[in-house]
Image: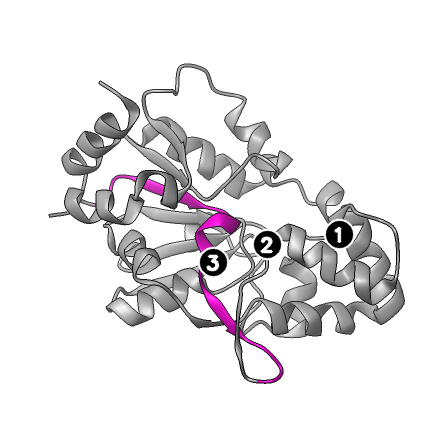
C-alpha cells in the first residue's frame, strides 16, 4: 500500500479526534493579508520575511535569525512587533485550508506566527482555543480544538505577550528549547500515542522540532510529511472524515 492510501485509511479509521496535525508555512502560503494600501497580498514565507528585513536594513545578510537580531537592534522590539503584526494578520483563507482544518483533529501544532488556522476555524464554525508555549500543557481544554503555536502567535498579542512568546531571532532560538520544554514532552507523547501524525506544508527547518522527531525510530507507518498541494490534502481529508 502506498503512502497516500495508507494515510487515507488511517484518517478514516481514526476520525474521532485521535490524529494530530502539524502545519508549517506551506499551509498558510495561499492565505492573504491586507497591505497598507488595502490590497490583498500573500502571507509571507520565512524567505519572504528575510527579504523584507534585508531590504529595510540594506544589509547583505541572508539568515532570517541574524536578520531578525539586526532588525531588532535597528528598530527596537516595538519595531519588530509592528512589522510581524502587519505581515502575519490574515484577511482571507482558502477553501483548501478550511477543509484541512475541518477534519476532527485531536490537536494542531504549528510553527506559524499567523492566524490562518484560527480564521479557518472561525469561518467553518469549529470551536478552538489558541495556546503558546508560555501556557502549560495542562491548561488544554479538549472541549475546543487546541491550536498550539510553538514559535509564538502574533495577531491579537500584546507587546508583553509578544516578547515572551515569539521565537524568531537566533538569541531566542538558542535560549528557548522546545524539545526540552513541557510542550516538547507533550509532543513526544502525541507521537507515541497518536495513530496518525500529518505534517502539512512543513519542512524540518525548525531544528527544535527535528530534535524531537529524530529521537524516535520506527515511526514511518504513522508519520506523513506532505505539502497540501502535493496530495490534494483537502480532498483527501474531506473524504476521510465522511
Q: Position of residue 220 (x, y in %)?
A: 38, 20
For marks 1 and 2, the one nearer the N-term is: 2
Task: Answer whether labels 1 and 3 touch (C-beta < 8 Å).
Answer: no
| Pick the front one: 74 or 148 | 74
User: Between marks 1 and 2, how big is the CA–CA gap?
Assistant: 15 Å
Residue reaching furthest bottom? 37
**How many C-alpha atoms fall within 10 Å of the one at disc 2: few (<14), some, or many (≥20)?**
some
Q: Which mark is residue 45?
A: 2
Q: Which residues are magenta?
A: 17-37
Examine the image and state in which quarter residue 205 appears: top right
Left or right? Give the position of 68 relative to 188: right
84 above or below 181? Answer: below
Q: Which mark is residue 121?
A: none
153 above or below 38? Answer: above
Q: Secondary structure at mark 1?
A: loop
33 above or below 142? Answer: below
Q: Position of residue 118 (x, y in %)?
A: 40, 65
Asked whether 34 falls inside the magenta stretch, the response is yes
**How many C-alpha atoms fall within 10 Å of the one at disc 1: few (<14), some, or many (≥20)?**
some
| Pick the front one: 152 or 3 | 3
Examine the image and state in which quarter residue 18 appears: top left
Nearer the viewer's eye, disc 1 or disc 2? 2
Q: Secondary structure at mark 2?
A: loop
Q: What residue would you read off at disc 1? A: 169
What residue is drawn where x is 67% and y is 60%?
164
Q: Secondary structure at mark 3?
A: strand
Amino acid at each position: 500500500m502506498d503512502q497516500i492510501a495508507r494515510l487515507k485509511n488511517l484518517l478514516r479509521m481514526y476520525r474521532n479526534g485521535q490524529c494530530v496535525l502539524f502545519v508549517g508555512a506551506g499551509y498558510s502560503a495561499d492565505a492573504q493579508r491586507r497591505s497598507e494600501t488595502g490590497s490583498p497580498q500573500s502571507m509571507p514565507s520565512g524567505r519572504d520575511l528575510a527579504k523584507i528585513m534585508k531590504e529595510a536594513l540594506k544589509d547583505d545578510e541572508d539568515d532570517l535569525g541574524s536578520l531578525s537580531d539586526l532588525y531588532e537592534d535597528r528598530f527596537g522590539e516595538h519595531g519588530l512587533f509592528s512589522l510581524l503584526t502587519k505581515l502575519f494578520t490574515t484577511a482571507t483563507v482558502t477553501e483548501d485550508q478550511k477543509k484541512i482544518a475541518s477534519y476532527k483533529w485531536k490537536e494542531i501544532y504549528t510553527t506559524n506566527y499567523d492566524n490562518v488556522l484560527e480564521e479557518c476555524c472561525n469561518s467553518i464554525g469549529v470551536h478552538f482555543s489558541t495556546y503558546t508555549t508560555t501556557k502549560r500543557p495542562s491548561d488544554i481544554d479538549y472541549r475546543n480544538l487546541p491550536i498550539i503555536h510553538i514559535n509564538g502567535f502574533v495577531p491579537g498579542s500584546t507587546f508583553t505577550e509578544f516578547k515572551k512568546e515569539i521565537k524568531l531571532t537566533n538569541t531566542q532560538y538558542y535560549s528557548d528549547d522546545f524539545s526540552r520544554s513541557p510542550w516538547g514532552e507533550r509532543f513526544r507523547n502525541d507521537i507515541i500515542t497518536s495513530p496518525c501524525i500529518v505534517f502539512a506544508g512543513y519542512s524540518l527547518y525548525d531544528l527544535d522540532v527535528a530534535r524531537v522527531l529524530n529521537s524516535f525510530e520506527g515511526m514511518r507507518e504513522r508519520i506523513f510529511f506532505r505539502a497540501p498541494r502535493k496530495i490534494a490534502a483537502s480532498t483527501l481529508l474531506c473524504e476521510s472524515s465522511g
